[in-house]
Image (cartoon, rainbow, N blue to C red):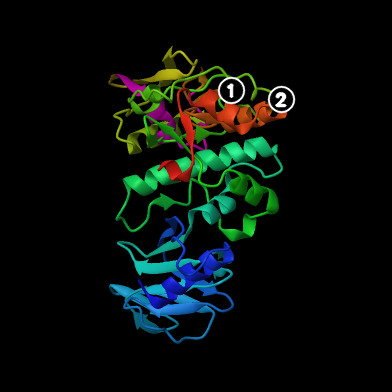
Amino acid sequence: MSCFRTLIIVIICLAAGGSAAAMRPEMVRVALFKGAETLRIDGDGVLLTDGRGEPLRVEMPLEVRRSGSGLSVNGKSVNRLVASAFSRISVNGKGYRALVEVSAADKGLLVVNELPLEEYLVGLINCEISSAWPIEAIKAQAVIARSYAVYQMQARRGQSYQLESSVMDQVYEGADVEDSRAAYGVRETAGEVLTYDGKTIQAFYHSNCAGHTESSKNVWGLSIPYLQGVPCRYCGESNPIRWELNLPMRKAEASLRGAGFQVAGLRELRVRGRNQSGRVQDVVAECSRGSVVIPAVAFRKALGYGTVKSTNFELRGGRDEVQVVGTGSGHGVGLCQWGAKGRANEGFDYREILSYYYPGVRLSGGYGR
């Protein structure tokens, strides 16, 4: 560990009211950018080191590029770049706390933000929900985001990062979106995670279930006791629950073929079967050489999660174009964020909200330990 990274950790301990010998805060490593071609890094009081932990003396702002197997920082070749600061580090115009690492990846640059887990959560709240929501919904979001992060930190221990800053894990945009209500929700639940059989759970969540959450078995083929579908009557009046799109058959064919399905000469798409939550099980593609059955979750992935917002949809239309009419948003597993908001508005506290969407779990302190 470099002397600068140690210094940052000492400052964090002192700011929390501890001593330099206090326990190191739980740290998380979040991939901010993967494959970036160039970066601009700026900030006040930023300490820079190279891949060997030696001080790097270059003027701010920094322009960072891939150079061979290493980096070019303002024209100076280094193996790796570590930037740390007491306040914020600006990366491509967004502020991040604690420490930022830049290294060469298979393609372009890999940028990782290493910071205390609790600070990561404060910067996450307004990316996943709104801090203007009822405080009990904010607390619930803090607990599930912490649980998800701790699970991934354990599963990906020793890897270059444990979380991505996108919908691949949890959306995180750094310190610029922090505010006092987000910080309060995180602070009031500090260290709390959801556990099942003594282990931190995979706390999956989604935007809007449109009336019934989904079983993990129907999405990923694995039945998890605390991820069974439950009725949800609190999200129906909030958020744009209904959506539709007109999908040209040529575009559908190209997307499905790109995902590996043999659908040459696609003529028709139709729904086949629904599960207990009302979501589509399969989509049948009628093609020039017969029928192809496509699982609905694979159909949604192939067309794009932002295009087909959930697997609760109907297919209408003819030979050249199909209309997709659906409800809800997301995979439907675990906590329904808009349902949690509705429950909080009705007076449920965050513990009641969490126990409903994750049956059989316990709320544990100290990161589940």
Q: Amino acid at mark 1?
A: Ala
Which element carries disc 1, helix, strand or loop?
A: loop
Asked whether the beta carbons under mark 1 and mark 2 sit within 8 Å of each other, the answer is no
Report crowding for label 2: few under 14, some 14 to 19, many 20 or more residues within 10 A (C-alpha): few
Pointer 2 residue? 346
Residue at image location 48% in from the left, 78% down from the top: 47
Q: Is residue 357 above or below residue 162?
A: above
Is 297 contained in the magenta span?
yes
**Magenta highlight on residue 166:** no
Specify whether 104 is left or right of 64.
Answer: left
- Find residue 173 and report its image quarter: bottom right
Residue 95: horizontal and vertical position, in percent? 58, 64
The magenta segment is 291-311
Q: Which mark is residue 210?
A: 1
**How far across and how far down the image is residue 257, in percent?**
33, 34
Viewer-nearest residue: 173 or 306: 173
Q: Nearer the viewer, residue 49 or 78?
A: 49
